[in-house]
Image (tube, rainbow, N blue to C red):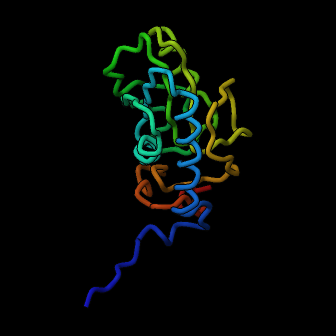
Amino acid sequence: MAQKTENMMEKDIQEVLFSEEQLQEIVERIGRQISEDYRDKKLLMVSILKGSVVFMADLMRAITIPCRIDFMAVSSYGSGTKTSGVVKIIKDLDIPLEGYDLLLVEDILDSGMTLSYIMEILQSRGPRSIRICTLFDKPERRQAEVDATYVGTQVPDAFIVGYGLDYDEKYRNLPYVGVLKPQVYGG
């Protein structure tokens, strides 16, 4: 007789903010809007790794028009909870950007420092346009002038994990998004 094993990460979650079903509804809504807005364009979706990989995988399946994908990895957080302000490119894009309508896909937009830096670099490479799509927005944490064209939803200023979002490389594989208990990260 199979016994369900306890998810060891569940004990660290204070509350669930978005269920799997709610996340799916958000992704489908954004996918429909992107499909409409980019219908006659040359869409290149760029996932900002690692946090956006789960969102990107679901979002690209919700988009009904042809598109290409690429990945970029940057580091600005380390294992802390606050941005360091220093952004380092770990993995750059493989596709030249000339002629593409670029959509940067991000898990969460809070300070905006990382995306501001990335947009400045990518703009110099000659794409036709650059827009941002973020699953979550924390506008009260914004330090740079960055706005997303596509926003799943705004979230409170709490430390959230799951569905790609992590703390110290853990919790990304939770199928929902929850608030991490402050004692876990020393908050």
Which residue corresponds to the image point at 35% horizontal and 82% vertical from the top-left? 4
Which residue corresponds to the image point at 50% horizontal and 29% vertical from the top-left? 104
Which residue corresponds to the image point at 47% horizontal and 40% vertical from the top-left? 63
Tell which of 82 and 50 is nearer to you. 50
Q: Please tell me whether residue 46 is drawn above or below residue 54 in the rendered image.
A: above
Left or right of 61 on screen, residue 24: right
Left or right of 57 on screen, residue 17: right
Q: Name the residue at the bottom extreme.
A: 1
Which residue corresponds to the image point at 61% horizontal and 67% vertical from the top-left? 15
Q: Name the residue at the left extreme.
A: 1
Question: Which of the image's four quarters has the N terminus?
Answer: bottom left
Tell which of 135 and 113 is nearer to you. 135
Left or right of 91 on screen, residue 24: right
Q: Please tell me whether residue 151 is drawn above or below residue 122 in the rendered image.
A: below
- Give coordinates of residue 182: x percent, y percent: 61, 60
Tell which of 104 and 75 is nearer to you. 104
Q: Please tell me whether residue 158 is drawn above or below residue 11 in the rendered image.
A: above
- Give coordinates of residue 17: x percent, y percent: 62, 61
- Give coordinates of residue 106: x percent, y percent: 51, 37
Question: Which of the image's four quarters has the C terminus?
Answer: bottom right
